[in-house]
Amino acid sequence: MKKLVGKLLNLSIGTKLTLTFIALIAITSIPLSFMVIRFSEKVYYERLYKSLIGSVRSEELQIRYYIINRDFWSLFKFVKGLMEKSPVSEAVVIDGKGHVLAHSNPQKYPIGSLYTKEGDINYPIVGLSSEIGKVILTLDKDSIKAEFKPIRFFLIASAVPFTGISFLLGLFISHRINSRLKKIKSSIKEVKKGNLENVKKVEFKEKDELQELSDFLYEIIQALKNYYENISYAQKFYMNILDTINELVFVVDKEDRIFYVNKKVESFGYKINNLIGLNIENIIENLEKENGNNSNYREVLLKLEGNREAIPMLMGTVAYEDWRIITLIDISERKKMEDKLKRAEILSRLGEMSVNFAHELKNAMLPLNLLSGVSEFSDDDIDVIKNSLTRINKLVNTFLNFAKPVPVEITKFNLSSVIEDILSIVESKARSKSIKFIKNVKDIEIKSSRDLLEIVLINLLLNAVEAIDDSGEVGVSAYIKEGELYIEVWDTGKGMREDEMKRVFEPFYTTKESGSGLGLSIVMKNIYLLGGSLELDSKPGKGTIFKLHIPLAGDLKG
Amino acid sequence: MGFILVILLLVSVAYSQDIVRFGFTAVVAKEDIESIEHFLNYLSRRTGYRFVPVFTKSYDEMSYLLSRRIVDIAYICGAPYVEDKDTSNFELLAVPLHKGKPLYYSYVITRRDKAYKSILDLRGKPYAFSDPKSNSGSLVPTYILIENGYKAEDFFNPIVYTYSHSESILAVYYGFVEGASVDSIVFEQFAKKTPEIASKLKVIEAYGPYPITPVVVRKGLAKSIKRTVRDTLILMARDAKGKKILKEFALDGFTVVSDEFYDPIRDMISTVKAFKFPYGNEEVSRQAP
């Protein structure tokens, strides 16, 4: 049933209209026909009864006489006569006891047989006081129906042209509506194709709801046209902006496939069309998906076509639900600048260093100067000369080493075991003192430069041990937080004054008798190379703490 | 007390001095008015008298009309002639000839699709007699049944009196009765005129021959008229027009017979009466079925 209703609802307007017309005709004509037939049947029956009773009544006296005289033959002729009246199927005259005196079908009901049927018309024949017999008529329903055949036929015959006319009317209206809808549809099709310019106003002869709809659609299309014009203007506007800015802008989908890139990419030798649909990992190195952190600038490398070297870029990301915007700024120039700056800084350090170096060299050469006036050298003198020369040699080597650039090799290693190894070396050098070593390092694997980190830790830990006079604590702890390594090295030694703290990182500055004065400057240099930072906190008499903050692999400088 | 239906067809009474009223009974098909008119017109032209037809339903009525001089001449049956001629005061005028003889038969007829072979097979069935006083339509079957030891009123269930041989034929045809005893001349006449009805019927027995139905005249009628009419009837077969009219009644002509000619019927009546059978008495014969 639901299905049927659904099917009916899905029919075209035309079919619906036609069906409605036919249904209307059926709804009105069927009950009407029924009523007409019922009414005419009723009238017919009344007439029929009246006429049949009338014809019996007109013969009543005769019949009475025939019954009394048992004139069977005359009674038979009478019932035979009644049979001539069309709808009578059975006519019988019975006596007072129900016995047949004459029946229209004498073979079935011979004289004297008992007749018990009721019949449709019962006309009693009364003698002087009592009933002496009865005329019973049975009507032939079929022949009565046949009498109504012409009426039925007429009603049906009249319903047929009505139905036909309504069908044609429905067809005509539906055709008209359909053709009008087609016109509207065809203008919508133009809209679909995007030919908003070609859409013309549809005008009908009928100024009805369809015209209103068509007008309304036309207005909407006009509004759409304006809207699209605005949008396309805005699109051009923003495109132009995007194409003129100095940044590379990518938009990628969930699977990191590029679906937009601005013109800037062409300046790197790429063609936009070749990039659309490509996974962005194909052109950006070190692209690690970030955990939804937007605008977190990181350095990445933009691969170039051919064997050309990748270009460093600063990458920013804005992630939306289904797509990400990735912006790249070419930082190769800045990098070069930075390198230049670094060299300049090192040179200036070297300058600073040279002052200390010269001072140290002068100190080392002092014995040689003193001995230069001596004509003969004693063994002690020779020892002094040897010592001085050794010291000078050492100074010169250290100086050379400091200025030499160090190659950085990134490896994956276990930080905990590296610290363990360093501690065992440091402990061996601190046997003369009573130092408690505290190690709080989780078993973590990191990707970084093991050499640089080892040098940093050895220097810091040795400084810590040296800061303790007789007894105290030296501690090291390391942990990773938000992808970055934090290391703290502390001691409970003599600590530093503020003015000392300012100078400790200067090359060749030392408070120790045997120190080169380069320890902390090397630490500083290495941390810089690792891209990290270092904090120092110290109080005289209380101790010192160095806090290191090093970003993990991928962000190394050098 | 009888219901008397008298139809007087007055052809013309303007200036005729002698009107002869001619009675017709069930011995002719009264429905054949045209033939009767032809017959009477013929007599009028030949005799100069004006003939007026008078019809009655029963022989009793005709006898009564003869006795009251309302009818002058009547064509009746042999049995009422024998019974009523003295009490109703009439005598033989002439007798018709059928196939050359003044004789006819009493037929027992049924529908063709029935299996009856004899009147005796119709026991307990509705059966049509014409007039209670008819020879062929009442007396003969009653007599035959008596000879076979039956009383007609008890043998049939019931006897239907049609007062007309042709109606008896129709009663059989419609199936209202299973059989009927009818005048052979009337039956043949009927068969000739309505073969579609006759084709559904058959004659299973023919009793006879019996003296034919006579034309009688009331005794008081002027002798000249009697003689003129008798002569005209006897001479009728000699001219073509008369012959043609006779043929319409299936007759060949007229002749004269003596009263003794009807002795066979007289014998049958006495036999029936001797059996103390209430013959011709309506009160008894019309029993309730």
Image (cartoon, coloured by chain):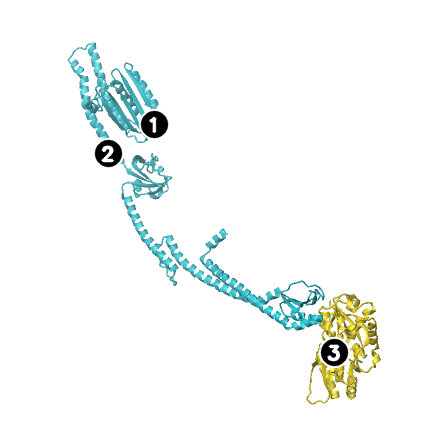
Residue B110 x %, y %: 75, 69
- Give the distance between the C-alpha atoms of the residues marked 1 and 2, in whole angstroms: 30 Å
Q: Is residue B212 visible?
A: no
Q: Nearer the viewer, residue A113 or B278?
A: B278
Residue A243 lies, with reference to residue A132, above or below; the image says: above
Chain of the residue where label 3 is placed in the rendered structure: B
Residue count near mark 2 (Cα–Cα under 10 Å), binned few <14, some 14–19, many ≥20: few
Chain hosting mark 2: A
Q: Of the numbered discs in the image, which one, if any, rests on residue B61? A: 3
Please, what is the three-letter code of the amino acid marked with disc 3? Answer: Glu
Task: Give the residue number, with chain letter if any, for mark 1.
Answer: A446
Amino acid at the residue labelled 1: Ile
Q: Chain A is drawn in which colour?
A: cyan
Q: What element carries label 3?
A: helix
**Residue named by callout 2:** A337
Q: Which of marks 2 and 3 is in front?
A: 3
